[in-house]
Amino acid sequence: MENAAVYFPDSSVPNLASISKASNGFAKVGYSIHGTLNYHFASNFYVFLRSGVTNNPISVVEMEDFVNDLYGLDFRFSHENNNMLSITPGLGYFLKKGSWEYRTGIFLGYGQINYPYYEMVRVVGNETLTWAHAGSRPSLSSITVGGNLQVSRAIGKFQLGLEVSYQRADFDYSIFPRTSPGGSQSVTYEDTIKVRTLNFGLFLLYPLIGHDK
């Protein structure tokens, strides 16, 4: 957590100003669901359109422990999950060996993720103090790129197989964290969510239009 802490430079004691998501995203293992449309235009090549969502919960234990050790107080953190939507066209190559099929592809397209909203809460007497971003929380957009590898076997008209995929995107955003009620010293920081996902899963293919592979 220390590498992700941003302090006010003019403070005589460590004064936390923000948390750098570019240094550490604190993402935990999540899930990914994608659908793909393939079109074979040559003997072993195809183009495809891939779309889906990836969800990753965020670990807050490191943030809580760091801040509580820093100030000697009892803060509680909460953080919204990272939910990324992507729509990506791509180019692929496949080989068919008997009932087995091997595919690999690369893709590049549009990615969107929710604003990385988090807050730190402390109860003082009858008052609840909240340290969080003050301002709008728009969805963030970026180019996303990746690739996948698939191995499958024919079961009737279906292809059932395993896929491993990698996807990355950088989402820039602004954050203005401050304490409420009462306000606190704050400035606007520019930060980046660096999404790097490695997915393993099952997939099922079904030919909408018959073709000779």
Image (cartoon, rainbow, N blue to C red):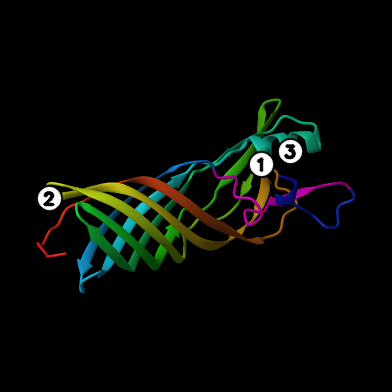
Amino acid under label 2? Answer: Lys
The residue indicated by pointer 1 is 181
Farthest residue to the bottom: give it: 42
The residue lying toward the viewer, choosing from 64 and 178, is 64
Whether 58 is among the magenta residues is no
Sequence-earlier tag: 1 or 2: 2
The residue indicated by pointer 3 is 66
Q: Can residue 4 be seen in this view?
A: yes
How many angstroms separate mark 1 from mark 3 (CA)?
A: 23 Å
How many angstroms separate mark 1 from mark 2 (CA)?
A: 62 Å
Q: In which quarter of the image is the C terminus?
A: bottom left
Looking at the image, do the residues carrying marks 3 and 2 touch, with CB atoms under 8 Å apart? no
Question: How dense is the environment of label 1, judged by Cα within 10 Å: few (below 14), some, or many (20 and up)?
Answer: few
Tell me the chief SS of the magenta region. Answer: loop
Amino acid under label 1? Answer: Pro
Tell me the magenta residue range.
13-27
Q: Is residue 49 above or below residue 58?
A: below
Sequence-earlier tag: 3 or 2: 3
What count of labels does the image hold?
A: 3
Q: What secondary structure is marked by label 2?
A: loop
Amino acid under label 3? Answer: Phe
Q: Which of marks 3 and 2 is in front?
A: 2
| Coordinates of residue 103 in the picture (x, y in percent) | 31, 60
The residue indicated by pointer 2 is 157
Q: Which of marks 1 and 3 is in front?
A: 3
Q: Is residue 136 visible?
A: no
Q: Quadrant of the N terminus?
A: top right
